[in-house]
Amino acid sequence: MNATRGPQRTSVATGGLPARRDLAQQAARVACPVHGGLWCPARRRRESPGPRATPFVARERGNSARSSAGRPDGMSRRPKERSMEYEQMIATVRQRAGLGENEAVRSVQAVLSVLGERLAGQEADHLAAQLPERLNGSVTRNPEGRRWDVGEFLKNVGDREQVANADQVRQHAQAVLRTVAEALDDDERHDLLAQLPGGITDLFGVPTPRG
């Protein structure tokens, strides 16, 4: 009798640990109704504490000061990094139009001034953002946009360039606008040409955008 009562007193003194172990062993022997055995992988996964999951916090859209395109003012595109330097642009125009350096600079400034005035909305800002920084002031901003056709466009270029010969003015405008087209990315070139009539877009020497 003393031998059998000793373990029971030990169980009470130690907080009932042997009793809880016995209950766990009995529960483990219950057959799983799904897997049909004493050992159940689903039960093992449930009994395993596993790592604590980190709660997912969704970031609400529209709370940032920038738009989805990355622009702080709601513009549709973020300007790309300028791909053409000022000296390179002037040198390219000089070669294409056969001009000296001062004449090439004057032609570039005149064409950009007329082109910017022809563009409506913020397109002139988008254009200037992708040209060499020294030419930023040459691009006229006119949100209303002039409704010039190619004849009026070239006449204004000649007046600002101070060149009277119409053929020379066209040659200079083509040299500048083809160089401008090469300095723009595809999106900006497409949007710029979409605002211009066919006669002016022909001066750029690139395919006219569709749609």
Image (cartoon, rainbow, N blue to C red):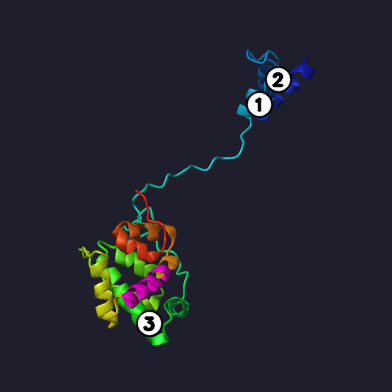
> Mark 2 packing: few (<14 Cα in 10 Å), some, or many (20+)?
some
Can you tell which mark lies on residue 105?
3
Q: Give the answer, above or below, for where 122 lies relative to 134.
A: above
Dots 2 and 3: beta carbons under 8 Å?
Answer: no
Task: Please report the bounds of the magenta region as a residue range.
Answer: 167-179
Give the quadrant of residue 90.
bottom left
Which amino acid does the dot numbered 3 rest on?
A: Val
Sequence-first tag of 1 and 3 = 1
Place of residue 151 in the rendered image (x, y in percent of width and height, measured from the top left) = 25, 68
C-alpha gap between disc 1 and disc 2: 8 Å
> Mark 3 packing: few (<14 Cα in 10 Å), some, or many (20+)?
many
Give the quadrant of residue 139.
bottom left
Place of residue 73 in the rendered image (x, y in percent of width and height, measured from the top left) = 30, 61
Which amino acid does the dot numbered 2 rest on?
A: Trp
User: Under tag 1, what secondary structure?
Assistant: helix
Tell me if residue 174 is in the magenta stretch.
yes
| Residue on which the image places disc 2 | 39
Identify the residue at image location x=27%, y=83%.
162
Q: Is residue 162 visible?
A: yes
Q: Main secondary structure of the magenta part?
A: helix
Disc nearest the viewer among 1 and 3: 3
Q: Give the answer, above or below, for where 191 lies relative to 111.
A: above
Disc nearest the viewer among 2 and 3: 3
Dots 1 and 2: beta carbons under 8 Å?
Answer: yes
Place of residue 210 in the rendered image (x, y in percent of width and height, measured from the top left) = 36, 50
Can you tell which mark lies on residue 18?
none
User: Under tag 3, what secondary structure?
Assistant: helix
C-alpha gap between disc 2 and disc 3: 86 Å
Can you tell which mark lies on residue 44?
1
Which amino acid does the dot numbered 1 rest on?
A: Arg
